[in-house]
Structures are given as C-alpha cells and as structure tokens.
C-alpha cells in the first residue's frame, strides 16, 4: 500500500488477459474465425523447439496488449495441432496470420523486431499502438515531479494492470514509494524488473533515488547539520550530510549548492565523494531535469576552470 496523509492505494493489480489465448484444432473456428468478425485476430503458429518463436511470441503479446483490445492474439502449437497449419500452407515457423471478418488477409514469417510488429498491427487496426500508454506514463511522471506520488502511483498501477512487465511503470511506482518513505516496498518493486532491463534509464533513476533516501534516513535533523556548517564552513562531512538530508526533503537546489561548494573548496575530499554524489543526484533527477542540466554545467565550470 502507498500511504500519504491517510490515503492508501493498492499497488499490485492482476490484469484479466482476455486478448491472448491458446487454441486447438477443435476451437480454432470459435477462437479465430468467429472472433475475427468482431475484431482482427492474429494467429501465432509456433512450436516448443522453435528458437525464433520464443523470441517473437513475447513481442506479439506486448504489442497486442498495447493495442488495448483492438486486436486479439491466438497461439497454436503446430506440433500438437498440425491440421490447421497444413490447411493454410504454413511450411515454416514462426508464422503469423491476420484474420479479419473470418478470412486470412495478411501475415508475416520470422521473428520480426518490435517496431515492425507494431507497424503490422497498426496497419491492421488502422490506429496507433501504445499511444494511450505513452500519454498515461507522461501524466504519471508529471504528477510525480509535481509532488503528488499517490496520484502518480495510481496511474502506474493501472498501466501495470494492463502490462505487468512495463519497466517504466515499475520504476515510476518504485519512485512513488521512495517519495513517501516506503523504502522496503520500493526495493520489492525494483526487484520485479528483469535483469536485462535493470540498466534502463527509468530503473537507474529509481535505484539512485532509493539509494539516496536510504543514505538520508541515517542522518540527523537538518537544523543540527545547518548549525554545524554555519559554525565551520570547512566541515565538509557536515555539509555533505546536509546536502543528502535537504535532497530527501525535496530541497534539491540547496542540496546541489552544498555539494558544488564542497567540490569548489576541495575537489578530492573523501575520495571525490561530493562529485560522485552529484552524479548520483543527476541520475535520480533525470538527464533533462533543469537542475541536472544546470548542475552539470556548474560542475564542469568548477572542474575545468
């Protein structure tokens, strides 16, 4: 649950996946021929021993889910059900045939990349795929930036209900947990990201934000740190800790100023800790954030002056 001022929201929703199904020789007429009179149906002819099939099927599933019910995907194992593929002249797999109004009208063979599969489906349904998802992601990201993690989390959860593997939404939900102090839930959410996706920008940003929050949780009150810095401007550790604490409270400009001040006074302090911390802040804030852009410029002017 994501808590904020007494409000709560469930972050895990299981989608009803009714746009993707397996079919048999006996159910092919109902699942494909009859269903295609309502909306286009893609039939994925595959076999367990087929390597390219294992590459293509997840791509097909992702694109079909992104089409939000405008097209269905029906999968047929040709080893278990050879009669239909034989009737259609399927001689190699993977093969995808599109049915509309009960008739096969188009298709392709081989493991195409996602962009080409998306283009195929868009031509079939005469509409763009994933547009609503992009709009929702933008709205969620904006809500998070504006300081409303509960509203953002509700949108991310809605997207995850449609596609549990949406890495951007998983990362965004983790950021929402970080913003509300639910660090353990943030860790659990990030753990759901597949290994091969963990270096994608939204995930890296969420991970950096979590690490910063964990560091800040061990620090003392901001007022005490401010007093230490005021009493001794050369107390770089106090200034460093103050920057982390300020960032955790959303006072990012002040955090940036203090870390840059450490770099300006002593570039090599504590094995270059201030510069490294700045890089982590920039990663957490994102490459296009105004403070990231200005911070990188100010850091460069110090380092190369």
Image (spheres, rainbow, N blue to C red):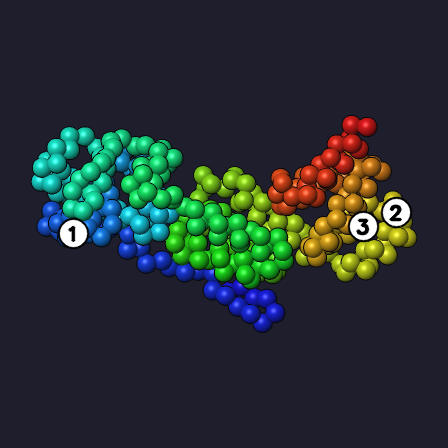
232 or 3, which is in the foreground?
Answer: 3
The tag earlier along the polypeptide, 1 or 2, is: 1
Whole-angstrom CA distance, mark 1 to mark 3, is: 71 Å
Q: Which quadrant of the figure has residue 106?
A: top left
Residue at 86 percent of width and 56 percent of height? 227
Whole-angstrom CA distance, mark 1 to mark 2, is: 77 Å
Query: In this rendering, would 188 be left or right of 270?
Result: left
Q: Secondary structure at mark 3?
A: helix
Query: Can you give x and y, in whole percent of width and height, for residue 216 in the image?
Result: 69, 54
Query: Which residue is label 1 attached to?
Result: 34
In the picture as drawn, the residue positioned furthest to the front comes out as 126
183 or 285, which is in the foreground?
Answer: 285
Task: Determine whether label 3 and label 2 are within 8 Å by CB.
Answer: no
Query: Which residue is label 2 attached to?
Result: 233
Query: In this rendering, would 198 be left or right of 241?
Result: left
Q: Secondary structure at mark 2?
A: loop
The tag earlier along the polypeptide, 1 or 3, is: 1
Pair 1/3: label in front: 1
Residue at 39 percent of width and 51 percent of height? 163
Q: Which quadrant of the figure has residue 87?
A: top left
Quadrant (top left, top right, bottom left, bottom right) of the C terminus: top right
Query: In this rendering, would 131 be left or right of 176?
Result: left
Question: How packed is label 2: few (under 14 Cα within 10 Å), some, or many (20 or more)?
Answer: some
Query: Can you give x and y, in whole percent of width and height, for residue 72 in the image?
Result: 27, 48
């Amino acid at each position: 649950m994501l808590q904020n001022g007494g409000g709560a929201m469930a972050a895990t929703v299981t989608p009803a996946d009714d746009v993707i199904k397996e079919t048999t020789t006996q159910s092919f007429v109902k699942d494909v021929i009859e269903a295609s009179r309502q909306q286009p149906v893609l039939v994925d002819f595959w076999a367990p021993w087929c390597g390219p099939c294992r590459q293509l099927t997840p791509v097909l599933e992702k694109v079909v889910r992104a089409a939000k019910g405008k097209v269905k995907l029906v999968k047929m194992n040709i080893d278990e059900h050879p009669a239909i593929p034989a009737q259609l002249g399927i001689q190699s797999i993977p093969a995808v045939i599109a049915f509309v109004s009960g008739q096969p009208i188009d298709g392709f063979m081989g493991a195409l990349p996602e962009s080409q599969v998306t283009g195929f489906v868009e031509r079939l349904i005469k509409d763009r795929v994933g547009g609503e998802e992009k709009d929702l992601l933008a709205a969620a990201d904006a809500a998070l930036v504006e300081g409303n993690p509960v509203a953002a989390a509700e949108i991310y959860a809605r997207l995850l209900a449609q596609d549990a593997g949406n890495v951007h939404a998983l990362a965004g939900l983790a950021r929402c947990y970080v913003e509300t102090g639910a660090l353990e839930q943030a860790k659990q959410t990030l753990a759901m990201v597949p290994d091969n996706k963990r270096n994608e920008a939204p995930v890296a940003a969420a991970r950096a934000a979590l690490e910063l929050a964990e560091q800040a949780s061990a620090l003392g009150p901001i007022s005490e740190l401010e007093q230490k810095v005021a009493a001794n401007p050369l107390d770089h550790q106090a200034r460093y800790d103050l920057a982390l604490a300020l960032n955790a409270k959303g006072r990012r400009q002040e955090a940036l100023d203090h870390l840059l001040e450490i770099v300006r006074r002593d570039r090599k302090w504590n094995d270059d800790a201030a510069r490294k911390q700045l890089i982590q802040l920039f990663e957490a804030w994102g490459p296009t954030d105004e403070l990231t852009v200005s911070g990188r410029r100010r850091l460069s002017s110090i380092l190369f002056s």
